[in-house]
Amino acid sequence: MSSHPAGRHRLIELYRLMRRIRAFEDAAEVASQGGVAAWGLAAAAKPALVRGPLHLSTGQEAVAAGVCSNLQRKDLLTSTHRGHGHTLAKGADPGRMMCELFGRATGYNKGKGGSMHIADFSVGMLGANGVVAAGIPVATGAAHALKIQHRPGQPQHIVACFFGDGAANRGPFLEGLNWAQVYQLPVLFVCEDNRISATTPTGPMTAGAGVSARAKALALPGVKVDGNDVEAVDAAAALAVQEIRAGGGPRLIHAVTYRFKGHVSVDPGTYRDPAEVQAALKNDPLLLARQRLLSLGANAAEVDAIDQEAQTEIEHALTQAEAAPWPEASAAYDDIMDTGAGVWR
Amino acid sequence: MSTQTLNYSQAAALALQEAMLADERVVALGEDLGRGGVFGQYRGLQERFGPQRIIDTPISEANIMGAAVGMALAGLRPVVEMRVIDFALCAMDEIVNQAAKNRFMFGGQGRVPLVARLPIGIWSASAAQHSQSLEAWFAHLPGLVVVTPGTPQDNYSLLKAAMDCGDPVIYMEHKELWGQTAEVDTALAVPLGRANRLRSGSDLSVVTWSRGIEPVLQALDLPELKGVQADVLDLRTLWPWDQQAVFDSAARSGRLLVVHEAVQVAGFGAEVAAAAAQATGCRVARLGAPRIPVGYAQVLENESRLSAAKVAQAALQLLQAKLR
């Protein structure tokens, strides 16, 4: 596969998206400092602006950007607990996302979900999920519906299903991949392999040759890519999405990347070998894309301007979120159910 | 004519068939549905609606339930068959964390209109893993409607109400009721959350549901309860449950007995009894199964079963207790 199929203009857009995700993650990380006592650290006196668990995708941006740049608005997406990048890349507004992380009424979930449940259904992003592998069955069901609802001559919309390397050791992974293959559903499985399951390296916990091999055992076509090379992810996704839309059934992309941060933002990740982290930082997908852009003839000022735009956008998101109102306490009783609403005891 | 003679299983099949004719978004998915379902409650439906709408699935309970959530989010109205409630335990994340929480945790962006059929109860010497009545587990969970139809009429009317309501519904048919036959009025709508008064009286209130109905009514015909005028309510829906009907009855009689086949400890009867006592000051008693797994041999199984004699004994004790 060509690692640079689309040239400079495509790469600029991919880089811009990755930079926006990085800026969002960096800002959210800072906003989460203080708050709770966890991971052996004491709580700071000043409460954090982002109070709950914050799972950052810093370092993994190429997977979200490369895959989602091949999706249309009406395509659907299910995500993991580490889902900010997928949400932004599917077209969500960072201001409303940040409001949600801050627990404000103007957030996508009205402050009811936070980072772990970030979602924007209006762009087809059906939600991050607090349970590992839980998005897989939901994605197969959404794809099943899209297949049932599809009419000849109409475009086939698809579902992109992100999950981590840890998810491949949960039952729903087998059930969902088997299901998608049995019914030949329009779903793209994306294993965003950051090589660590919370604080435990996934490799020693995983039998066999990994995710692609498991897909292959179900005759589900899969491909392994460098998940830090956004052009490689983009190219793999373009091909897979095209085949899925044409009625080819499910596909799997196994994108190997690296989680720069701890499991959650307040986890310093001291259980990892510093040399491993240093090596990974040199393989930063943004650094690689920037070098590649320069080699394709982009000038540094142009790339710096993209960085600045992203920074400005996220600063606005932070300002918006800090000024946004809290939910009313009464909102705790809305959006639960219609049947018997009003009776809570 | 809107009345026909149907058994409990046929009544549900008719309700589903009518819903599928009226709304092409309604689909059903589960194991063995193409052969009518394990209890015949889907008989004839795949022939009529095809395998795209009556979907035979792999034995993948987690994915069946999770897929139903995804289908509902994408615009379908799935009916999920779990075969027996005991198998739904393989899909608890999908029920508890996904279906029940979706609407709230995503701030009302989506709806999960699905009906999950989880047949309950002791049936045909099926032993510990195919005989449970776990309705209390689901009544405990915000976001879920919980329905326990006890007659062919209610299995017709309540299944329709469940499919219409737009919320995730845990719909628990009792496996020993499939063959129960009665006149079913297909024009009769039964709202969710409304109890059905089976007997009127003011000596004693008895609240039950599902398989509890028969032993309760039999007990009231036993000689030891001769002359006792009992008010008998079939709750039919456990969430939302008909608090007003129960409280009114308990306030009149001053004595409330709750009867269910499920294990008594932390059963839903505890909720009904406590709420009624708190609201009315009535004296309460519960009758459910002892906290033992359901055994295989008849003599063991009987220890978990309700009977008219057990109900009568519990009723007499409550009647003999002094009111404050």
Image: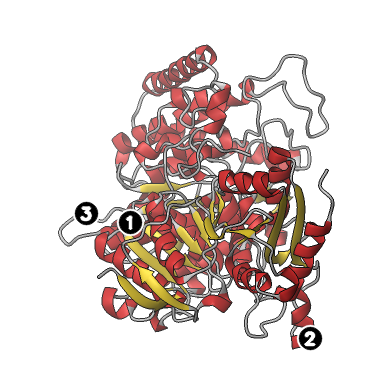
| Callout 1: SS | helix
| Callout 3: SS | loop
Residue nearer the viewer, B216 or B53: B216
Say if residue A243 shows up in the picture: no
Query: What is the chain letter for disc 2?
Result: B
Residue A215 numbered mark, or none: none
Answer few, some or many: residues within 10 Å of disc 3's Cα (few below 14, many 20 plus, some between 14 and 19). few
Residue B299 numbered mark, or none: 2
Answer few, some or many: residues within 10 Å of disc 2's Cα (few below 14, many 20 plus, some between 14 and 19). few
Q: Amino acid at mark 3?
A: Pro
- B211 left or right of B164? right
Task: Give the mark nearest the N terminus, 3 or 1.
Answer: 3
Q: Residue at x 55, y 18 (%)?
A: A326
Query: What is the chain letter for disc 3?
Result: A
Q: How many marks overall? A: 3
> Which residue is under mark 1?
A239
Q: Amino acid at mark 1?
A: Leu
Q: Residue at x 43, y 43 (%)?
A: A230
Residue mark closest to the camera, 3 vs 1: 3
Q: CA distance from mark 3 to mark 2?
A: 62 Å
| Callout 2: SS | helix
> Which residue is under mark 3?
A155
Residue nearer the viewer, A290 or A306: A306
Q: Quadrant of the C terminus of chain B?
A: top right
Colour scheme of the rendered structure: secondary structure
Q: Amino acid at mark 2?
A: Val
